[in-house]
Amino acid sequence: MQHEKVLIIEDDRAIRQLITTQLEPLNLHIDHTDSAEAALKKMASQSYGLLLLDINLPRMDGLSLCRKVKEHYPTVAVILLTALSSDMDRVIGLEMGADDYICKPFFARELQARIKTQLRHRAQLLAASINNEHDFSCERNIQLGSLLIEFASHQAFLAKQAINLTATEFDLLAYFASHPNHVFSRQQLLDKVWGYQHSGYEHTVNSHINRLRSKLEQHHQAPFIETVWGVGYKLNPSQLSN
């Protein structure tokens, strides 16, 4: 993660400075700007690994910028900075392809953990791309009925159709598939998939699972990621017919 470039897009100067200070322990190259338009100009000439993106920007809003970034720079991780009350913005942000979101105000350790997680996901994607280019083999595949997960290509297939997943959605599905019929609480999934422990952010798991289910249902009507009420979630392989 050393020397990775992170772009902070936030129109509040005090918040930009605070975030920059909070990220100093990560040894990243930090850049910042106060508008979506300026961010796009910077991205046209420089390579960034991750964007910290405020939703409430002047002129072009953060959600619109997120969509543009994911269209043109799909391997760049995007973490949205949102207000506690903006549940709909968070849902829409995930629909636009955002990898994660964090609510203001936030703690430095939490922000650092989320950034490290997303940069790790990005490194895995880039490594998978290089392995594919040179036809190297990587980790084992997982086949559960009509579900196929290929770690080398970082892709998932359902009924032989490729599923368009974000890096976090792929990791979440792969974790479930690696432990069929095992019930995980939201906090366990935060720890194992996102890589941090922080109570109060279980709704991050809810949002990603809802989005993942929506994508899976386009290819498979039977819901195989099931809710175990009062406990958490599990993948039921019996629902996956070949």
Image (cartoon, grey):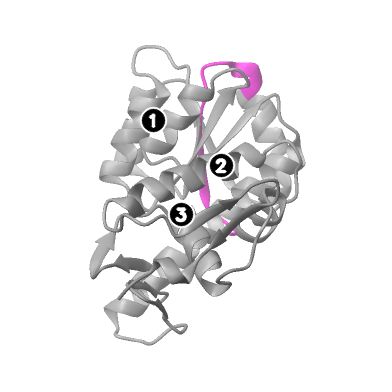
Residue under the point 56% across and 28% down: 81
Count of residue discs: 3
Q: Which residue is mark 3?
A: 169
Q: Quadrant of residue 84?
A: top right
- Residue 54 visible here: no
Q: Residue furthest left?
A: 161
Callout 3 amino acid: Glu
Distance between the alpha carbons at the discs numbered 3 and 1: 26 Å
Query: Quick one: label 2 or label 3, which is nearer the N terminus?
Result: 3
Residue 157 at x, y = what percent?
Answer: 30, 67
Residue 208 at x, y = what percent?
Answer: 50, 45
Query: Quick one: label 1 or label 2, which is nearer the N terminus?
Result: 1
- Residue 17 visible here: yes
SS at mark 1 in the image: helix
Which residues, given as a range, are shown in magenta?
Answer: 1-15
Residue 193 at x, y = what percent?
Answer: 60, 58
Residue under the point 66% across and 59% down: 184
| Residues at discs 3 and 1 in contact (Cβ within 8 Å) | no
Residue 15 at x, y = what percent?
Answer: 64, 22
SS at mark 2 in the image: helix
Query: Quick one: label 3 or label 1, which is nearer the N terminus?
Result: 1
Distance between the alpha carbons at the discs numbered 2 and 3: 12 Å
Q: Residues within 10 Å of mark 3 (few under 14, many from 20)?
A: some
Judged by depth in the image, the label closer to the viewer, 1 or 2, is 2
Callout 1 amino acid: Ala
Q: Which residue is mark 1?
A: 39
Q: Which residue is mark 2?
A: 206
SS at mark 3 in the image: helix
Q: Nearer the viewer, residue 100 or 49?
A: 100
